[in-house]
Structures are given as C-alpha cells and as structure tokens.
C-alpha cells in the first residue's frame, strides 16, 4: 500500500463523521433551525452506538442505537425551540452540556472495553486494483452511506416538492405559514433528521474509527461540523469538499506529529480549530448580511398567530 | 387536543420571578428520578447533593470559593447576551487570563519582586482575556463571521496553549515531571480573607463586579444601549446606537472579566498553573447567566446554587458512588428547564380541544 493511498484512506475516515453530522445539520438549518447541540448529539451517538455494538456484537445495531440517541437528543431540542419557542442558541448550548454529561454517564462503564470495528468492503479483483482499488471499493459502510446521504439530500432539496417547501420554510416562515404549510411540523422533522445524522456521525467514531469509547471523544467535531455548514454556504455538494478538506488538515497534523518535527505537538493539534476560525473569517468576508447565503429565517423563533 | 403558545400582552411579572424557582424544582424532580434509575435512594442522594454542603462551615466557604469565578464570568456574559451577541468561549478567555497572569508569576519566581506583582498579574489576566475575546468580536464586526463558532473554537486553542506551556517552558523543574508550574510566590498569590479558610480576595472582587454592573445596566446610557440593541435592534438603529461598537465592548468586558476570574483562580485556590484546573467554569457560567435572568444580583444567587452542584457532586461521588458526570447532566437539565420556564414569561400555553383542519395543520 502506497503512502498516498494510506493518506487518502485515513483522510476519508477522518472526514466521514464530519460529513454525516454536517449534512444533517444542513437540512435542519435549511428549514430555518440552528441546532448548536451538534456536539452533544454526536457524543451521545458515540456512547450509545458503542453500547449497542458492545452488547449485540453488531455494528449495524450500534449505528442504529447512535442514530436513535441523536434523534432523542434532537427531540428534546425540538420540544424546547419549536414547542416552547425557546432561543435556539441557548437551547443548543444546553443540549451540548447535557449530552456531554449524559454520554459520560452512559459510556463511563465501557471505558477500556473494545469491539470489532465495522468491516470494510471487499470485492474480489476490484478491491485489489492498484491505486484506487481500496479507496473506491474498500471502505466501510459508513463512508458509502455518507456519500449516499449527501446525494440524497441534494436530490431532496433541489429536485422534490417537499424539499422546495422545506427551503421555503427556512427562507421565510411567515410566507410559508400564510400559504398553509405546517411550518412547525416541517421544522420538527428537519431537526429530528439532523439529530439522526449527528448520532450516526458520532457513532462512527467508536464503531469504525477507533474500536473503543472515550468520554469526550468527539473533541469538538460537532462544532467543526457546524462551521462546515457555513463554509459550504448551505449547499450540500460543498459540504463534501469542506469535510474532506478538514479531514485532510486533521490527518496532516497527525502525520506531522508522527514525524516529530521541532514544532510543539499542541500547536499541531490546534490546527483544525485554528483552520476553522480562519476559514469562517475568509468565507464570511465581504459577503455582508444582505448577501449572506444563510437561510433568511435561520435561528428566528416562529410562533404562529391564530 | 393540542398545546398552543399564545403571546402575552405584557411580560408576566409573576412568571418572571417564579420561573427560575419552578425550573429548580422541576430539575430536582428529574434528578430524583435519575437517582432512582441509578439504584440510589433519591432522598438520600438529593440530601448529599444539596443539603449536606450547607451544614458545615468548610463547605459553606467552599461554596463562595467556587461561586467567585462563576459570578465574574457570568456577569460579563450577561452583558453579551443582553446585547444579543453570543460569546460562548468564556472558558477559553478564562484560561488565557490565567496564562497571561501566570507569565508574570513564573518570570518573577524566586526574585525579590515586591507587592506590585499580584496587581500586575490581575491586570495582565484581565487584559489577556479581553484581547482573546476581541478576536471573535472583530471577526464578527469586520468580516461577519459567526462569533458563536469562532469563540468556541478558541477554547480548544487556549486549552492546548496552556497544556504546551506547563509541559514545556513553564514546567516546574522540581515538579517530578508533572505538567504544572512551580507553586506561586506569596507576592503572586491572592490573599486569604479569613485566616484558616480558602476564602480569598476574589470573592470581594466578584461582589464589586456585581455592584458596578448593576449600576452600569440600570443607571448609564451604555447599559441602556446594550439592552435596546438586544431587545429592539431596529429601534436601536433609528436611535443611532452603534451595534458594532457594542459587540466589541461587550466581548471585551466579558473576556476581561473571564480572564480576571482565571488569574484569580490560579493565583488563589489553585496556587499554580496546571492543565484542567477549571472544571468548566466558563461553560457553567452560561447556565448561571440564564438562571440569574441576565441580572447581576440574580447571577450571584444562581452562581451560589451552581457552586452547590459542584460541591455536592464531589461529595456524592465519594459518599454514594455516583459518577461525577452526573453534575454535568444536572446542569444541562437545569438549563433546559430554565429556558423552558422563561418561555412562560412571554407566552401562555393554551390547550385547544377542538382542532379544525387548518389549526391542526399549523401546530
């Protein structure tokens, strides 16, 4: 296996949780809801995903458990922000604080335990092809699922009537409401979908990336995924580019640390976070409020008057 | 049958006072259920958590010690939140304040530097925190970058910087390779208020911060501008208030207070710089700010309550063997309920029993 191939494989692996979580959040935000609880939903997905796989020995059940945990968390968020019209920023923070604590409670008993990670696809002849064989035909199921998810979201948002309505709800909830669309119900579905994706992204970490669970193992990936949605200007196809770029930064700093350059390892470790800040500034620059690509009703509470 | 929110004509004054109390009661009920689920006697557990720390003098002092940083950070954050800007990176500003102030303590270590060291350290801490908070503020005002995400990312960076310093250049040469700076000299240590306890000067500073902020919010143009920009941005624009200036200002004040809290914590109860010296004060302070209804005096009460959860959590871990993470769960649940109950100030919940088709479609 060549070095380049190895790097590309590890970049794909590092990017997939970001891609899954960011794709889900994109749908949530396109419906006009800013769920800052991504980190909390991901870490709960990681803890419950590991628990599921540990007890049943099945990665698929683990993945489902992670998705379910993410949905449970997002249901709390939906109840607060959509049901009770609570400020979305504050509710998202509460969700993260709660999720980090609860995941420690659930996953604390599993620290030190190991599981079999998700198997990689193996097709005779195809996977053995030189250069791209393993990259295209030798991934685990999550990687293929994340690509399919983004394609599916793109098709839904831009090629279906339901996607058009969802975008309308996110861009102008008053008009959508006046036209008779159930704004709150659509937003609830979008939040739950985002929660399931975040849970799956979190579950990827212990089920495919490392074979164990550590409290706080998401290490800010939820926040980076949130930044990716901004980076992608709320367009699904650009999420892929963003996620792989960030995955590349993560892997590069790991390789640089392994080469023991005369640079403090902490500086290397801070690169993904610093890169996020720099990218956010660069992407927001000159766009102004009017030219922003953000859904116009993003983060604004909607209470139907009757 | 369905529940529908209905906007109140006026903010409910009764609900405004009652909502934090209702939130606390609901949290305690939820915690009791959680304890029962963990196989602990809920009454015993809640007693260990919330009553026992109030019964001995050591814990009472400890309450004030833990509430001190929470008050200082939360008061600053409340200014941001009132102005509708979202500094959620106070933990990072807290750490940077500790680092900047500690720089002087480490540099003057073992020298015959006089009593000027501590005041200078406090100023460095506040300046460091304020400048660190200036990064997301400028990124927001100048470039339109989300201050939520940038301020949070900088928490991780601050954490790593602290880790680098105490493992590298500032490591105590006589510290058996532990990642910590040397114990600060007496001139670089926050003085104790009551001999034989851990109560330090920081508690007084926190009370002063509460008093000054109350005056600023209630009696000055600046306080008025902050509230108008947050509550009615359009009106603020017509009045000619500079929203950008207020973003910078509120971020620098909150960052400065967080930084000051950071250096006081390190030069006070901790006594040296080490990674993980903060149990997440910067994040807990967000809860404190909301539980205190973004009001300085309310924040002081709320900080004492959340300090209680830190102490109760530590005692519960020892005496009834519940995980320390339970405290975070508890704090998260509390914030959920606080926010939910706050909604009752602005809205009333109506139960509608005869859903017509159109109404059903809306809710």
Image (cartoon, rainbow, N blue to C red):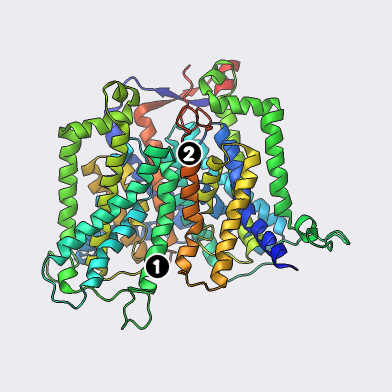
Question: In the rendered view, would you say A89 is above or below B37?
Answer: above
- Label 2 or label 1, whichever lies nearer to me, is 2
Label number found at residue B163: 1
* Residue A284: image tag: 2
x and y percentages locating residue B337 in the rendered image: 40, 42
Instruction: In this rendered view, identify the residue nearer to me: B29 or B111.
Output: B111
Measured as percent of width and height from the top left, residue B353 is found at 52, 21
Measured as percent of width and height from the top left, residue B348 is found at 39, 26
Which chain is mark 1 on?
B
Q: Which mark is residue A295?
A: none
Q: Under tag 1, what secondary structure?
A: helix
Q: Relative to residue B355, is residue B275 depicted above or below?
A: below
Which residue is rendered at x = 53% and y = 23% of the image?
A: A172
Rendering coords of residue A270 (x, y %): 47, 60
Residue B225 in sight here: yes
Q: Nearer the viewer, residue B297 or B131?
A: B131
Distance of mark 2 from mark 1, alpha carbons?
31 Å
Q: Nearer the viewer, residue A305 or B274?
A: B274
Residue sitting at x 44%, y 52%: B153
Q: Is residue B92 above or below residue B185?
A: above
Image side of residue A122 versus residue A97, left or right: right
Residue in the picture at 74% in, 54% down: A141
Chain under label 2?
Answer: A
Say whether mark 1 and mark 2 are on the same chain: no
* A261 lies above or below B344: below
Q: Residues within 10 Å of mark 2 (few under 14, many from 20)?
A: many
Please tell me whether mark 2 sits on a helix, a strand or a loop: helix
Q: Are marks 2 and 1 in contact (CB under 8 Å)?
A: no
Q: Residue at 25% across / 61% down in the picture? A: B263
């Amino acid at each position: 296996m060549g070095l380049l191939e190895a790097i590309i494989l590890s970049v794909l692996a590092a990017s997939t949780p970001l891609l899954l979580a960011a794709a889900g959040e994109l749908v949530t935000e396109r419906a006009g809801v800013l769920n800052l609880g991504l980190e909390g939903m991901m870490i709960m997905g990681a803890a419950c995903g590991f628990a599921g796989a540990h007890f049943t020995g099945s990665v698929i059940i683990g993945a489902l458990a992670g998705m379910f945990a993410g949905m449970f968390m997002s249901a709390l968020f939906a109840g607060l922000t959509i049901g009770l019209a609570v400020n979305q920023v504050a509710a998202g923070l509460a969700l993260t604080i709660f999720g980090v604590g609860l995941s420690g409670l659930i996953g604390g008993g599993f620290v030190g335990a190991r599981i079999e990670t998700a198997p990689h696809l193996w097709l005779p002849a195809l996977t053995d092809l030189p250069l791209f064989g393993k990259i295209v035909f030798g991934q685990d199921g999550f990687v293929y699922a994340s690509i399919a998810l983004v394609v599916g979201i793109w098709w839904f948002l831009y090629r279906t009537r339901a996607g058009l309505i969802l975008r309308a709800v996110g861009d102008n909830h008053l008009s959508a409401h006046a036209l008779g669309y159930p704004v709150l119900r659509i937003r609830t579905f979008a939040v739950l979908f985002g929660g399931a994706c975040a849970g799956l992204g979190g579950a990827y970490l212990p089920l495919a990336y490392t074979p164990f669970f550590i409290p706080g193992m998401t290490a800010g990936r939820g926040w980076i995924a949130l930044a990716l949605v901004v980076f992608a200007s709320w367009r699904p196809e650009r999420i892929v580019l963003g996620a792989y770029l960030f995955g590349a930064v993560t892997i590069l700093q790991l390789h640089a640390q392994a080469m023991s350059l005369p640079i403090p390892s902490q500086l290397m470790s801070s690169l993904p976070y610093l890169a996020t800040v720099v990218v956010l500034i660069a992407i927001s620059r000159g766009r102004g409020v009017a030219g922003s690509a953000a859904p116009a009703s993003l983060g604004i509470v909607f209470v139907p008057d009757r | 049958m369905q529940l529908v929110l209905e906007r109140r004509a006026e903010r409910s004054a009764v609900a405004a006072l009652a909502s934090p109390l209702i939130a606390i009661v609901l949290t305690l009920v939820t915690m009791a259920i959680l304890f029962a689920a963990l196989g602990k006697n809920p009454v015993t557990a809640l007693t260990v958590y919330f009553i026992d720390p109030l019964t001995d003098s050591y814990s009472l002092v400890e309450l004030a010690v833990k509430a001190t940083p929470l008050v200082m950070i939360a008061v600053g954050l409340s200014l941001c939140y009132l102005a509708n800007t979202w500094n959620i990176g106070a933990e990072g500003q807290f750490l940077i304040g500790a680092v900047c102030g500690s720089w002087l303590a480490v540099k003057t270590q073992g020298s015959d530097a006089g009593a000027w060291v501590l005041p200078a350290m406090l100023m460095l801490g506040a300046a460091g925190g304020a400048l660190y908070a200036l990064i997301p503020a400028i990124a927001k005002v100048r470039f339109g970058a989300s201050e939520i995400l940038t301020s949070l990312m900088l928490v991780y960076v601050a954490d790593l910087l602290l880790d680098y310093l105490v493992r590298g250049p500032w490591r105590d040469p006589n510290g058996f390779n532990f990642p910590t700076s040397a114990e600060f000299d007496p001139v670089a240590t926050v003085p104790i208020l009551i001999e034989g306890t851990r109560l330090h000067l920081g508690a007084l500073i926190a009370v002063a911060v509460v008093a000054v902020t109350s005056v600023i919010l209630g009696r000055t143009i600046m306080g008025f501008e902050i509230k108008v920009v947050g509550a009615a941005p359009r009106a603020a624009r017509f009045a000619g208030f500079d929203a950008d200036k207020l973003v910078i200002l509120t971020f620098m004040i909150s960052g400065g207070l967080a930084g000051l809290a950071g250096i006081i914590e390190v030069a006070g109860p901790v006594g040296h710089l080490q990674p993980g010296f903060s149990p997440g004060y910067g994040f807990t302070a967000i809860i404190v700010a909301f539980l205190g209804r973004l009001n300085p005096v309310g924040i002081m009460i709320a900080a004492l309550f959340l300090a209680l959860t830190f102490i109760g959590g530590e005692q519960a871990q020892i005496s009834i063997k519940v995980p320390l993470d339970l405290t975070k769960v508890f704090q998260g649940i509390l914030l959920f309920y606080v926010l939910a109950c706050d909604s009752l100030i602005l809205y009333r919940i109506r139960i509608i029993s005869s859903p017509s088709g159109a109404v059903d479609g809306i809710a």
